[in-house]
Amino acid sequence: MTDHDLQFQQASRADEPALPQDVRDLLAHYQALGPDGRRRFHEAALNPQRYGLEPRPGAGNGGSLDAPNPPEIQDSWQVFTLADAYVERQPVEYIAAGLFALPSLNIVYGAPGTLKSFLMADLAVCASAGQPWLEAASWVNGNQAAAIPTRQLPVMWVDFDNGRRRTHDRFGALGRAHHLPVETSFYYHSMDSPWLDAGDKKSISALLERMLRKEIKFLVVDNLGVVSGDADENSGEMVRVMSEFRQLAELTGAAVVLIHHQRKSTGNTSRAGDSLRGHSSIEAALDLALLIEREELADTVNIRATKVRGADVLPFSAVFTFENRPDGELHSARFYGIAANDNSSDAAIEREILEALSGASLNKTELTRAVKAELSQVGINRIRDRIDRLAATGRLLIANGKNNTEKIYNRP
């Protein structure tokens, strides 16, 4: 029995003593109809003109029995048109200049021991107070690194990797190094029960409620591998996990950063993004992926983007500093910025083009070779394309060479 039938029958029983005979006959005919006939009855009652019928005078005002209205189907999907696309919007906001848009889904990954969690914890602490991140290391001669401004927003860290004692110690050390008051809008969880299962809607919904209560706009989860539930990290099951994190970002307007691990090297050369461990759907879901690299036992880490949606993120570097108490336990810790060795970005190509033309005039072949000598891993076609772009925008001057068939490039 449908809801319409039930409503119709209830109306019939309630009004039977006062119903005229013609309405009683109508009810009897209705009860005899099959499902298709009843459906068409409702359609005709709601849209009589469609079936060539005239609405009865007084219908809906007690003069006759109205057919029960079918429940309206509410579509939860919101449709947009180009009118929405053309609306001027505010510039994209970031947790740190150019890093981790609001909202977004991101990964920071690297091999074990690369200080990736500690580096992100340093950013999380700085962002909660609106302090600049990676201030230039003053002891490095000629250091051209610039501090990265952050946006002050409530921050939440969810740890299922380092353990509660180490997490307390690290955030205490970072907070002391940055001189943060206890009232700072920084919140963290460690090894809580029930364990976060990103493949389970109930678990993600609980995390969503925690974020909404604190108005969290920067969430860091450490780490993806241990919060994926029973999803096989190397299978398409990760689509569901990443989709849940994406929805979490959209519903809260937050930048969500997942700490993850690097795939073990196979010795084969491939693009950098292939080193992200797990199924390809993980990388496909991301707005930004940052690879953290560190030489063994070194205090310096190098950060480069291997997946970007939007403006390029240039490589940057940081140096880790800390102080221990007399008993050897960690007292304070933080990272400082140092100039990175950028030998692959478009900015690096432009830098070497302009450097090669300092006090010299070169044809395209000579200029390409000069840049290639400095940036051995950059392709020749990419260098030539960058030369053409600089010339087209007036950043390089072109003069005719031999027999007017050769182009000579100069700096303005």
Image (cartoon, grey):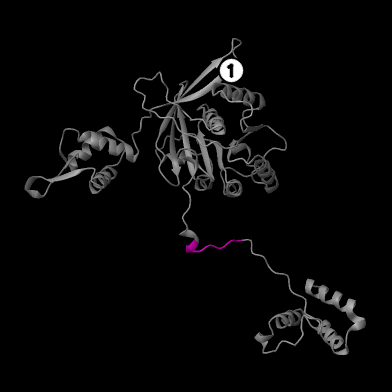
Q: For the residue marked with disc 1, what is the amino acid?
A: Leu
**Furthest-left residue in this view:** 403
Residue holding disc 1: 330
- Magenta span covers which residues? 77-83
Quadrant containing the C terminus in the rendered view = top left
User: Farthest top residue?
Assistant: 326
Viewer-proximal residue among 382 and 62 = 62
Q: Quadrant of residue 370?
A: top left
State the SS at label 1: strand
Residue lying at 16% horizontally and 45% vertically, measured from the top left:
398
> Is residue 371 something that shows in the picture?
no
Q: Is residue 367 magenta?
A: no
Q: Is residue 280 above or below residue 40?
A: above
The residue shown at (73%, 73%) is 70
Q: Is residue 81 magenta?
A: yes
Residue 274, horizontal then vertical, whole percent: 46, 41
